[in-house]
Image (cartoon, helix red, strand yellow):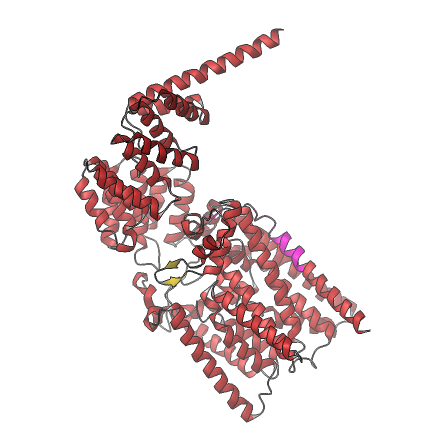
Amino acid sequence: MSHIKKSFYNSRRGFAFFLLFILIIIAYSNTLNSSWHLDDYQSILNNRFLHIKEISIKSLSDVIFQRDYGNFTRPLSQLTFAINWYFGKDNVKGYHVVNTGIHVFSAFFLFLTILTLFKTPNLKNRFSEESGYFISLLSSLLWAVNPIQTQAVTYIVQRMSSMAAIFYIISLFCYIKGRLSDSASKKTILYVCVLFSYVFALATKENAITLPIALVIAEIVFFQDTGRPETRRRLFWAAAITISLVAALGIIVFLGKDLFNIFQGYENRNFTPGERLLTEARVIIYYLSLIFYPAPTRLSIEHDIDVSASFFYPWTTMPSIILIVILIGLGIWQARKRPLLSFAILFFFLNHVIESSVIGLELIFEHRNYLPSFFLFVPVSTGLKWLIDKYHYRKGMFYLISAFVILLITGYASGTYIRNMKWASEISLMMDAVSKAPESARSLNNFAKAYYEGTGQYDKAIELYRKALYLKTHNRYYKAFILNNIAGVYYHLGDHKRAGKFWEEAVRIYPAYDFARYGLAMVSVKEHNWDRGFHYLDNINPPNRENTDVLNMKGIILFYQGRHEDALSFFRKGMIINSDEIKSTVNTGAAYCLIGEYGKAGFFLADAHKRKQEDIMTLLWLIETGLRSNDDKSVKLYSEKLGSGINRTVLTALAEKLSAKRYSEDGILTPVYQELIAGEIYKTAETKAGLKNGRQQSVLMQQKK
């Protein structure tokens, strides 16, 4: 009999997993090709530490133990990105498959955790097995297909949030199972799993540090009889000690043993820690409204929100604080009478303590609700189950409530699918952000870059950038970032003088802005003002002075000053620091070519060509090396390779630029024998034309036959 019961129990869990899997896959079926966005570029696409070439202990350990400003950079999530990169490089499909898979298993472990809660001492006699199953499944479904989760699932880099959450919920599940187990060995195994899951969660994202406090809350709400005074005293001290230990761990692991590092981000903010704390009261209430009413029209990557300057400005600040106090009070007050409601409330606010308090982060992001919202639909599902049971014999009401539940799930899943349409490309996402946050400088700046600059409509891009300068931002230096974008457009258009003026203004506003200094160095190089260019590069902040681009630019300046050996040392150093970037390799080969060491030049240029065969500049330098060393065979070989990759029209245009000495590439030495190379390319173009005409004549002859 017990075997049959266990089989039935497993089949019900299997059905729950199947239903969660199907609905999530349907809701996220249009995300496989969703593009990279925003932080994806810096954290994944341009993060050379993740671009591993093999799966080995060394390569993976290099990813895990890379450090950023003295702190671990979420090594476990970085590791998954590195593995994704190894198998698929910049193809987004693999990343989305992993993100969606994490979401599926998060939902399933949420279901298992809620289901297990119904076996705890304070719940087991309140609900039937059928009710517990229904509430667990409905709660996890409503959480899983809620449109607010799209930012944590579809936004690739936010895998950090979803991964931390899955380890968090696994840890909570194992703790509850361990508390319910009668076997000492099973308890030990489960508690070890709790510890490991906690470590994995912390290695994924810092906000998982609150887990021990969540375990204490679960212990109090679901296992303890808080009616006894001695129990309350014991639990009070247990909670106080746990909170102190968690705070100490956070300082040691994430703040470098310096409590004041928590305020480190405020040097770039135009609000104080106190103002942020007041503002977050309004943000949290807004989060709750989004969770329960997640219409796609309300969701956005960017939200306009005013900073709360006091308790009464904006006026919604004080009501929000009062409502939060009432909700937390309700959670504590209802701990004995309604444990599920109590835990849902306390869990939500606990897991907003890190990102919605005084730490100097951006004010609002939807993905921050992925973990806190885990249990919010449990009270909702409990209420719906109560209504179904109450009106079970009144068919009209029963069918009406059942239809509402089905429509609610369908509506959430449909909303997720619709919201994911906006994540399809950066243009669609930024266009959506501008429409929903029209006063946000960041949304307009990002839209101008993604759409108008990305499609070559530079005049319109500059127009929007200039407009963004006068819009709202919570970063006091954001205007410098916008000025940098304007300067970049003018530089691309060849107006170096105007570009320099905008970069100078960016540095004036934000003296520590290295991008702008590098831009000024590029302008100086274009103007052949070598000393000024070197001055700007030398004034870049120490951590970025070893950047490959900076080293390359210094090498280029030195080379044009005739200091060839000094230039080579910078190029070689750039190769050592970033072996993936071919600029240093090409420049090293070019430098050897110009000083007459053609064997070494060929070695480095051939290596660069092998790694990036379509790179035109590498091929041009290989042709120049052949011309200088009288190696006609190499000249012919690489001219043909250059011609094979592009059509005759483009090839002719390239030859024209070279003959007029108008071909250049920032960050890489340009060929000296441009006119001679142009002649070789013209020959290649004529050969291609002859072959094409010959093939056409052959086809005509065949048709005549």
Is residue 678 positioned above or below 348 on the image?
Answer: above
Q: Is residue 224 visible?
A: yes
Residue 523 in view of the camera: no
The residue drawn where x is 43% and y is 33% is 613
Q: Give the magenta range.
A: 20-36
Q: Is residue 36 left or right of residue 547?
A: right
On screen, residue 496 versus residue 405, left or right, reads left
Q: Residue 562: x, y in percent?
A: 19, 35
> Is residue 29 inside the magenta stretch?
yes
Nearest the eye: 646 or 462: 646
The image quadrant that residue 542 belongs to is bottom left
Counting from the top left corner in percent of width and height, residue 409 is at 65, 60
Q: Is residue 689 above or below residue 431?
A: above
The residue nearer to you, when weighing 694 against 587, is 587
Image quadrant where one finds the N terminus = bottom right
Q: Residue at x 44, y 74 (%)?
A: 321
Tag count in the figure? Answer: 0
Q: Quadrant for the C terminus, please.
A: top right
Q: Quadrant of residue 607?
A: top left
Residue at image point 48% right, 75% down:
324
Report the residue that reaches farthest toward the top. Answer: 705
Tell whether 592 sits left or right of 9. Answer: left
Q: Residue furthest right?
A: 1
Left-right relation of 689 to 464: right
